[in-house]
């Protein structure tokens, strides 16, 4: 059950892009015609593109193909083809063959050069990829290409997600209005660097290719790399950003700061949707770390708390076991002074500068931990840097979902 999922406004069309979907029965032939599981995002023009990928060393072929394509064609990407239901990972040489065939199938449907197409796959690892079914159904994606099909696309990339995830924004820069629309999927196997997810963002803002790549890395570090559901990082995690603005004849933005801010806010919203829909979660917890020596240190401490099974099960049991949180901080590997640490849960001060606060009562902490949403705030007293991480609890339902994932 998702935690307070927001009612999403319809996603906005992005000038220069069309989106289509198809039902190919990727996970099982029995699902063909019953749910959309392939999506095709096509640029009307050559697009500038950037990507951020999983840190898992067992990287799926679609990730390797994507990195290679961006190395040579980052200024003229024309499409993304993605499927749900099969990760096409852990399959040896055939994995590379099938990944290329998926790209070629998407390119043919979109009417573009295969060398200018990116791909993503998500689903079960180690199962032969049903390329024949995908090829047979890809024409559906081509015939359904429209500018306002982003919501259908968000549904088509779902696996164990209980709801589709998208976000849109518009920003005015120098008298021009630009649109950003992003979709993502993710529910389990979620952990930073990247979280287990696919994410695709399109914009008509004219961003130079040389600016896109470093910008997307910064944005990912403040959004998708700040979430955790279960501490596992997948083989296929991918985030792509495409800009049609250059191909539409706009001059590249000289100052991209306003755009980067809008992109960061959009990606944070998408990242939080993933946590809210985490497998089996019943709590949405924000972990704010302040007073760190650096932003990297703050993020590392936040992640350590977010992935701790002991902390997450305490969240699940509504047990305000502050000792587990401090233990996770100590296990983070970051230099700390225990006499400087302060810990709060919402507005309840639990631990202050190395000591249990004299006014703290466990009943007050328990009341906070019973909420479906609350914030843990840590001040390390080591500097002025900060970071925010979002996580959920670890429940029996998570075990059930993943024990039965392939059945």
Image: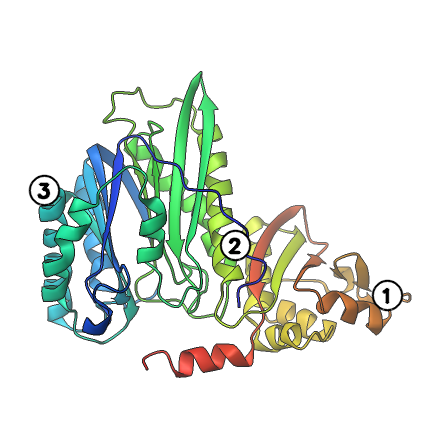
Question: Circle 3: is it few (<14), some (14-19), or many (20+) Cα within 10 Å?
Answer: some
Q: Which callout, 1 or 2, points to the residue nearer the camera? A: 2
Q: Is 263 left or right of 355, judged from the image as shown? A: left
Instruction: Measure the C-alpha gap from mark 3 to mark 1.
Output: 64 Å
Question: Which residue is identified by label 3?
Answer: 113
Residue beneath label 2, please?
272
Image coordinates of residue 185 in percent, x first then y, are: 39, 58
- Identify the element where label 2 is drawn: helix
Q: Residue furthest top?
A: 175
Q: Residue at x 26, y 65 (%)?
A: 34
- Provide the secondary structure element on which disc 3 rests: loop
| 352 left or right of 180 in image | right
**Label whose residue precedes the other's in the sequence (2 or 3):** 3
Q: Do we see residue 353 in this rendering?
A: no
Residue 31 occupies quadrant: bottom left
Say which residue appears at 44% left-offset and 78% top-offset: 401
For residue 368, what is the image quadrant?
Answer: bottom right
């Amino acid at each position: 059950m998702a935690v307070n999922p927001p009612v999403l406004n319809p996603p906005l069309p992005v000038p220069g892009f069309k989106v289509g979907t198809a039902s190919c029965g990727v996970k099982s032939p029995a699902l063909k015609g019953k749910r959309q599981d392939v999506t095709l995002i096509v640029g009307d023009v050559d697009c500038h593109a950037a990507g951020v990928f999983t840190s898992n060393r067992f990287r799926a072929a679609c990730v390797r193909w994507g990195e290679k394509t961006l190395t040579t064609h980052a200024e003229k990407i024309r499409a993304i083809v993605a499927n749900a239901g099969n990760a096409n990972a852990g399959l040896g040489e055939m994995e590379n063959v099938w990944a290329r065939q998926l790209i070629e199938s998407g390119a043919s449907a979109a009417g573009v050069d295969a060398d200018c197409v990116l791909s993503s796959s998500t689903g079960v690892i180690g199962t032969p990829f049903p390329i024949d079914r995908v090829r047979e159904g890809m024409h559906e994606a081509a015939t359904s290409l429209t500018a306002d099909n982003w919501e259908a696309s968000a549904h088509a990339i779902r696996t164990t997600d209980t709801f589709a995830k998208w976000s849109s924004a518009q920003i005015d820069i120098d008298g021009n209005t630009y649109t950003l629309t992003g979709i993502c999927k993710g529910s389990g196997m979620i952990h930073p660097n990247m979280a287990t997810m696919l994410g695709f963002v399109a914009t008509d803002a004219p961003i130079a290719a040389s600016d896109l790549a470093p910008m997307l890395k910064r944005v990912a570090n403040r959004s998708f790399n700040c979430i955790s559901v279960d501490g596992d990082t997948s083989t296929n995690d991918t985030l792509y950003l495409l800009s049609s603005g250059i191909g539409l004849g706009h001059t590249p933005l000289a100052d991209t700061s306003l755009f980067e801010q809008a992109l960061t806010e959009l990606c944070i919203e998408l990242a939080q949707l993933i946590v809210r829909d985490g497998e089996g979660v019943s709590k949405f917890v924000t972990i704010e770390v302040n007073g760190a020596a650096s932003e990297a240190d703050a993020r590392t401490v936040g992640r350590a708390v977010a992935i701790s099974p002991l902390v997450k099960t305490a969240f699940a049991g509504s047990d305000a076991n502050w000792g587990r949180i401090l233990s996770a901080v100590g296990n983070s590997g970051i230099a700390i002074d225990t006499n400087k640490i302060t810990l709060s849960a919402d507005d309840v001060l639990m631990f202050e500068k190395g000591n249990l606060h004299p006014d703290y009562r466990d009943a007050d902490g328990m009341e906070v931990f019973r909420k479906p949403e609350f914030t843990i705030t840590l001040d390390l007293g080591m500097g002025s840097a900060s970071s925010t991480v979002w996580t959920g609890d670890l429940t029996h339902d998570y075990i059930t979902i993943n024990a039965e994932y392939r059945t």
